[in-house]
Image (spheres, rainbow, N blue to C red):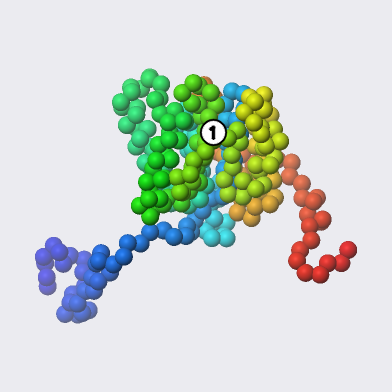
Amino acid sequence: MDHRPQAWGRPRDDVYGAYDASYLHTSGPKQTTQSPIVTGTSVIAIKYKEGVVIAADNLASYGSLARFDDVKRLRVFAGSSVVGFGGDVSDMQYLDRHLNELAIDEAYDQGEDAAPTLNAANLHKYLTKLMYKRRNDFDPLWNHILVAGLDDERHPFLASVDLRGTAFSAPSLATGFGAALAQPIMRRYADTESQAAALTREQAIDVVKECMKVLYYRDARSLDRYSIAVVTADGVELDEDVRLEKQSWAFADRIKGYGTQTV
């Protein structure tokens, strides 16, 4: 019997034949993710007078299967910002670990009681560079991210970045199906910065809750449980187990499917 360490845990060649290590060779082409498997759907957010309200449901779908119903897609950064992830869950977990390490480094550098230097605006710039770099490496992180918090002047800040590194800011933002279903609702109340500055906290929360209800009605990859966060100068208030209220499916009898219809 071969007692050398490099042979430990391997079948005996004289009994099972030579060990095939061809799959360990790295001479083949580099392979990267081309189509995410486990994904999260919409993230929505809206500014108001004193901060930002952001929400995302707790479902991670395995293809079209509603597989994981307790996946939190809102992450707090440095106690002052919230990052919402849409898209691939494994890439979200990678970014979450990366941002946790970044927050720890910032805490060591600045001290426990110091205000965070990486506010939401700076964090968004950092994520934009990271996503663009990964895109240029032909190994993108398959996520669409919203960053909510405050900027350098302590004003409400909300911005987006996708897997290509495309970044922009607006009074209201949404990823996934939310861009088609929730944005028209939010733009009724915050189409411009001045309209967003006139919204109260309660109005902003009500708008987001209404959008989450519409998304549950119309998006097959959504869930009736979601996380919602309110970011202000005082910090982050995060509730990760909110349920939809006052659902009504009365509109369903007016929906007609494909094919010949009889009225």
Up-down relation of residue 5 to residue 194 (above or below): below
Question: Circle 1 sits on which residue?
Answer: 158
Residue at left offset 65%, top offset 42%: 183
Q: Nearer the viewer, residue 140 or 4?
A: 140
- Residue 175 point in image, percent of width and height: 57, 45
Residue at left offset 57%, top offset 60%: 64
Q: Secondary structure at mark 1?
A: strand
Q: How many marks?
A: 1
- Residue 60 point in image, percent of width and height: 53, 52
Residue at left offset 57%, top offset 26%: 51
Q: Is residue 237 visible?
A: no
Q: Quadrant of the C terminus?
A: bottom right
Question: Is residue 161 toward the left or the right of residue 139 in the image?
Answer: right
Question: Is residue 133 toward the left or the right of residue 204 in the image?
Answer: left
Up-down relation of residue 62 to residue 212 (above or below): below
Residue at left offset 21%, top offset 69%: 10
Dot 1 crowding, Cα within 10 Å, few <14, some 14–19, many 20+: many
- Residue 15 point in image, percent of width and height: 19, 80
Q: Nearer the viewer, residue 58 or 136?
A: 136
- Residue 122 point in image, percent of width and height: 43, 31
Q: Amino acid at mark 1?
A: Leu
Q: Is residue 192 visible?
A: yes
Q: Nearer the viewer, residue 208 or 47?
A: 47
Q: Quadrant of the N terminus?
A: bottom left
